[in-house]
Image (cartoon, helix red, strand yellow):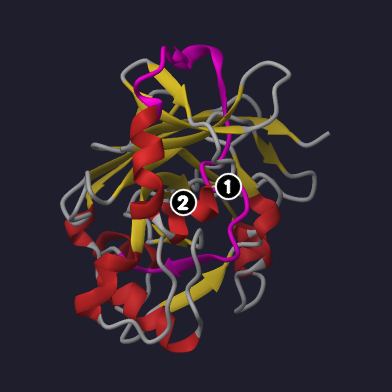
Amino acid sequence: MKLASFVHGDAPPAIGVVQGERIFPVEGISDMNAVAADYAAHKPALERALGGGGLPLAEMRLLPPITRPGKIMAIGLNYADHILESGSAPPEQQTWFCKQISSLNGPYDSVEVPKVSAALDYEAELVVVIGKGGRHIARSEAAAHVLGYCVGNDVSVRDWQLATSQWVIGKSFDTHAPIGPWVTTSDEVSDPHGLDIRCLVNGEQRQGSNTRQLVFDVWAQIEHLSQAMTLEPGDLIFTGTPGGVGGAATPPFRLKDGDVVRVEIDRLGHIENVCRDEI
């Protein structure tokens, strides 16, 4: 099932089920975090929505499918080719940072080129949406704690990111976490390790890999994070980016005003964001 948050005209934000080129609004559910907390309990209402007439998907403005995540966690150096191009040694431990909630952005909204930097970069990523919360989640139980998956771009301001050993600020500029276009639930994609992932800039492919190449897979990430913190419904996990980032190119490639960044993941759809100079 594909679950989206959307706006239609002047109506307040709503939740809908996407099927083909139409979206079917769901009555009585306005909080995707509640769906994440107990998908099984909400599934009958979601299925009933498909009995309606639906609305043209192309006429909707899609929002981030999770509009109020409690946490956005992201792992660095998690594809072998990206580790190589970064000049780093393969990590013995998972390397985590957070993206602030104010960086969250819609799947087709513009991404700001900051006034304070010309070192803007893209990072195509699979994003995990946590369903049932928990602490000390065993690897064998990790899949049961996932609502589903979406497409993400861990937009990065490289000079700010690399100015210190702490990456949080360089990863957390406003608009720099576009996700979507919807959550594809885990009953539709039971194993996220085998999905082709691509990033195109102005139509040119710059990243291409498969999620089976993750150094630390999704289940290992959930197990590790939950040893330190309680994972809660609606939390987002950016699972790492493959090789081909602009900062590793010779000369470095920088995103600028007007560039169009498209991230695609098989079975999950795509997001596409135009870069615009910050006003």
At a point 62% along the width and 19% down the height, the residue shown is 8
Q: Which residues are magenta?
A: 49-78
At a point 43% along the width and 83% down the height, the residue shown is 135
Relative to 253, is 232 above or below? below
> Which residue corresponds to mark 1?
31
Residue 17, horizontal then vertical, whole percent: 40, 30
Residue 218, horizontal then vertical, whole percent: 29, 66
> Which residue corresponds to mark 2?
35
- Left or right of 76? Residue 198 is left
Q: Are the residues flagged by discs 1 and 2 in contact, CB closer than 8 Å? A: yes
Q: Secondary structure at mark 2?
A: helix
Q: Quadrant of residue 63?
A: top right
At a point 45% along the width and 55% down the height, the residue shown is 36
Query: Quick check: is 124 in the magenta stretch?
Result: no
In the image, what residue type sits under mark 2? Val
At a point 78% along the width and 37% down the height, the residue shown is 278
